Image (cartoon, rainbow, N blue to C red):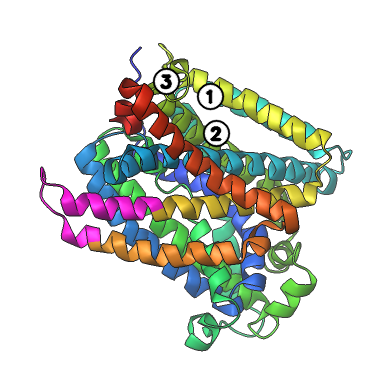
């Protein structure tokens, strides 16, 4: 079949759940929110999440305007190519592929650790190495990824529904019981918002919205994309911002604004689960332990689907082997890209196991690298959207969305600089390893740009197709 023949029948709700599952809400609650409180701006964390949601929404306005004019699949890769040219576009394509692949690997590591914990703590079963469970997850993901996205979206919808129910039950319990000392609004006061490290808080906050552009990546696989994609995009941003802000606010109130910093300093790993047990009971605690795995698996499946589609689009353009851009005749899925991704993931996981990378460091370091590379992508796409909308002669200038995107670009540039300065804190790497990781993150983007330059001189046919052009 033709490379442009990906098809599906996802509606707005399925698309929203597919993208939100990529963020792993329970993963964020149990592992991310306490870290953000500790290393970011403390009690002011909920307000920061809301502000980051507004910034992403500003970018989404321009992104959707541009996407509606182009009507192309390819996500950031296609948009950045249209706005900044093929050299920057292929650089962003390589960066996006790496970004989501790193996210996929980190989710495998977390899922393996989480399933092992659930088996030992909830079911009192035997302890096993994390990578055994990660490989089982990979097998299941490979099978699901082979079929049409509509099948995976149903699985993600079920998992996400249970995750949201748990978080809603927790939030309600904290409100009903009045927290530790009554429900306070300290999180939204200027004093708390600008306390601690506001720069780290923004880095973490922007990372919460990873994958929101996947609504555009799946353009060919939804029904009525002109209507479904805007609803899903704004729905994703609103759901993530409100859910995480409210849950972070409840978490802070569960211990009290005066005590929460001491709690996360002394008991960072179990701060969220202890709060769940106290306010929602043992059953919810056990459910949260299990859902940390199911949330990780949903994250794995969503990250696999997104990464496979970036491989598919690069294959369809001839950048990667064209076979990766082929579509399964029956399932109408990027089956070859999905299979190659599964094999590559297995090989990299094997390297982690053979080199004996500590499991407690593996997830956190990979997640930090993902956050940094994602901000690089956001900077590029914000500039690309602004430039494209201001010079689009065919449809006329869209000044409002362009300005919104350029404002987001400036804020994201500051965030990227802060991320570079605080890369050690973000990745956990120091010294030579820190420098190597920084070189790798930027090197991938520059390598893509350099390859585009080579293609321009020697393979003009491939060069002209960059960015699904």
For the residue pair 133 and 181, the one nearer the viewer reads as 133
C-alpha gap between disc 3 and disc 2: 16 Å
Q: Which residue is mark 1?
A: 338
- Please give the name of the residue rendered at 59% of the width and 76% of the height, measured from the top-left corner: 197
C-alpha gap between disc 2 and disc 1: 8 Å
Q: Position of residue 34 (x, y in %)?
A: 66, 67
For the residue pair 51 and 357, the one nearer the viewer reads as 357
- Residue 79, numbered label: none
Q: Position of residue 312 (x, y in %)?
A: 44, 26
The reply, left or right, for residue 17 in relation to residue 361 is: left
- Residue 325, numbered label: 3
Residue 368: name its quadrant. Answer: bottom right
Closer to the camera: disc 3 or disc 2?
Answer: 3
Residue 197 visible somewhere in the drawing:
yes
C-alpha gap between disc 1 and disc 3: 10 Å
- Please give the name of the residue rendered at 67% of the width and 56% of the height, measured from the top-left corner: 427
The answer to whether the residues at label 2 and label 1 have Cβ atoms under 8 Å apart is: yes
Indicate which disc, 3 or 2, sits on the residue closer to the N terminus. 2
- Residue 304, numbered label: 2
- Please give the name of the residue rendered at 49% of the width and 67% of the height, measured from the top-left corner: 49
Q: Report crowding for label 2: few under 14, some 14 to 19, many 20 or more residues within 10 A (C-alpha).
A: many
- Please give the name of the residue rendered at 49% of the width and 86% of the height, measured from the top-left corner: 189
Closer to the camera: disc 1 or disc 3?
Answer: 3
Magenta region: which residues? 380-402
Q: Can you say whether 264 is above or below 95 in the image?
A: below
Q: Residue furthest front?
A: 457
């Amino acid at each position: 079949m033709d490379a442009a023949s990906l098809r599906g029948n996802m509606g707005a709700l399925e698309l929203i759940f597919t993208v939100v599952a990529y963020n792993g809400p329970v993963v964020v609650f149990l592992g991310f929110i306490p870290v953000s409180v500790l290393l970011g701006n403390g009690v002011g964390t909920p307000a920061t999440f809301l502000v980051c949601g507004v910034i992403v929404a500003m970018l989404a306005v321009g992104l959707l305007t541009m996407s509606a004019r182009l009507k192309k699949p390819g996500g950031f890769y296609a948009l950045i190519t249209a706005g900044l040219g093929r050299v920057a576009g292929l650089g962003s394509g390589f960066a996006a592929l790496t970004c989501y692949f790193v996210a996929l690997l980190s989710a495998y590591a977390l899922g393996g650790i989480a399933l092992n914990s659930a088996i030992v703590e909830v079911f009192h079963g035997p302890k096993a190495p994390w990578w055994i469970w990660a490989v089982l997850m990979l097998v299941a993901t490979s099978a699901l990824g082979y079929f049409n996205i509509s099948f995976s979206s149903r699985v993600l919808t079920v998992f996400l529904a249970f995750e949201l129910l748990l978080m809603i039950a927790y939030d309600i319990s904290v409100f009903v019981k009045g927290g530790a000392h009554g429900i306070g609004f300290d999180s939204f006061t200027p004093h708390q918002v600008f306390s601690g490290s506001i720069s780290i808080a923004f880095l973490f906050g922007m990372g919460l919205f990873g994958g929101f552009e996947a609504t555009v990546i799946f353009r060919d696989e939804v029904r009525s994309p002109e209507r479904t994609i805007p609803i899903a995009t704004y729905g994703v941003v609103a759901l993530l911002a409100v859910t995480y802000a409210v849950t972070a606010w409840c978490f802070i109130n569960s211990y009290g604004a005066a005590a929460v910093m001491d709690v996360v300093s002394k008991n960072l790993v179990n701060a969220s689960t202890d709060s769940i047990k106290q306010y929602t009971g043992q059953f919810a605690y056990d459910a949260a332990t299990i859902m940390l795995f199911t949330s990780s698996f949903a994250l794995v499946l969503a990250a696999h689907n997104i990464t496979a589609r970036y491989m598919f689009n690069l294959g369809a353009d001839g950048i990667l082997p064209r076979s990766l851009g082929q579509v399964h005749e029956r399932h109408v899925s990027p089956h070859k890209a999905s299979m190659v991704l599964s094999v590559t993931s297995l090989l990299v996981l094997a390297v982690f196991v053979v080199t004996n990378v500590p499991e407690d460091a593996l997830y956190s370091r990979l997640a930090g690298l993902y956050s940094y590379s994602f901000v690089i992508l956001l900077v590029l796409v914000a500039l690309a959207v602004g430039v494209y909308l201001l010079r689009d002669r065919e449809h006329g200038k869209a000044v409002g969305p362009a300005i919104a995107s350029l404002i987001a670009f400036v804020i994201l540039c500051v965030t990227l600089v802060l991320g570079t300065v605080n890369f050690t804190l973000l990745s956990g790497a120091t010294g030579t390893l820190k420098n190597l990781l920084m070189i790798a993150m930027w090197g991938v983007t520059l390598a893509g740009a350099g390859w585009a330059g080579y293609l321009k001189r020697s393979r003009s046919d491939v060069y002209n197709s960059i960015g699904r052009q």
